[in-house]
Image (cartoon, helix red, strand yellow):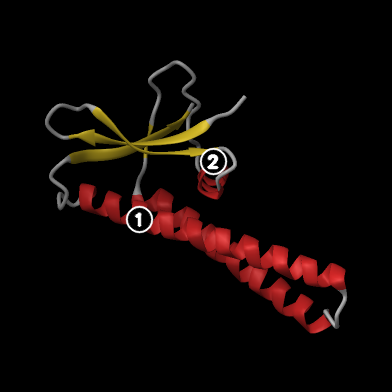
Amino acid sequence: MSSYLNIYGVLKDSKKKISLASFSRSHQLYQELNDNLSIPWAGNDDVYMDLTNTDIQRVISNVNKQISEVDKRLSEYERHANGNIDIINDILSFKEYREELISTREYLYFLEELIDNTTYNYEDAFEKIICNIS
């Protein structure tokens, strides 16, 4: 069964939900938000969580820690590679994972900016940003 992280903007004037993005379970952003926040499982219900900058900053902090850990492991592996194909494959995997984390962090920065604009009334369209998993 597949599930998706759904992100919506709630319009100020009509309170209508506008779908902004949807990420499958295999996407790193889904995994990071789901692991770090209590996002409700909607199923067939209208259940949502308000996304706040505090939430997003907590996830960004966690992603930054993961990037730092990967960098440390990469450094260690690169020192010991010496042509060992298994270690070289591990290095390539770590580098790919690092790129996924950096991409995820960029999505989070975008969400943070969107929430900032909504929170401080810089954005005329949305009252708030909400999400759920369905």
Q: Is residue 15 left or right of residue 38?
A: left
Q: Is residue 99 left or right of residue 105?
A: right
Q: Quadrant of the N terminus?
A: top right
Number of marks: 2
Helix or strand or loop: what does disc 2 sit on?
Answer: helix
Amino acid type for the residue under numbered disc 1: Phe
User: In the image, what residue occupies the spot 56% across and 49% down?
Assistant: 28
52 sits left or right of 70 in the view: left
Quarter of image, res 34: top right
Q: Could you tell me which residue is drawn at 85 percent across and 71 percent down?
A: 85
Of residues 115 and 22, the one nearer the viewer is 22
To which residue does mark 1 refer? 110
Amino acid type at circle 2 is Asn
| Disc number placed over residue 34 in the picture, else none | 2
Mark 2 neighbour density, 10 Å: few (under 14) some (14–19) many (20 or more): some
Per the model, the C-alpha gap separating discs 1 and 2 is 17 Å
Check if mark 1's residue and mark 2's residue have beta carbons within 8 Å: no
Looking at the picture, does residue 35 appear above or below residue 62? above
Where's residue 81, x and y in %? 82, 79
Location of residue 12 with respect to 105 vertically, above or below: above
Q: Nearer the viewer, mark 1 or mark 2?
A: 1
x and y percentages locating residue 26 in the rendered image:
59, 42
Q: Is residue 61 above or below residue 76?
A: above
> Does residue 5 sit above or below 46 in this rendering?
below
Foreground pick, 120 / 20: 20
Q: Residue at x 44, y 31 (%)?
A: 132
Disc with the residue nearer the chain's start (1 vs 2): 2
Q: Residues within 10 Å of mark 1 (few under 14, many from 20)?
A: few
Mark 1 residue element: helix
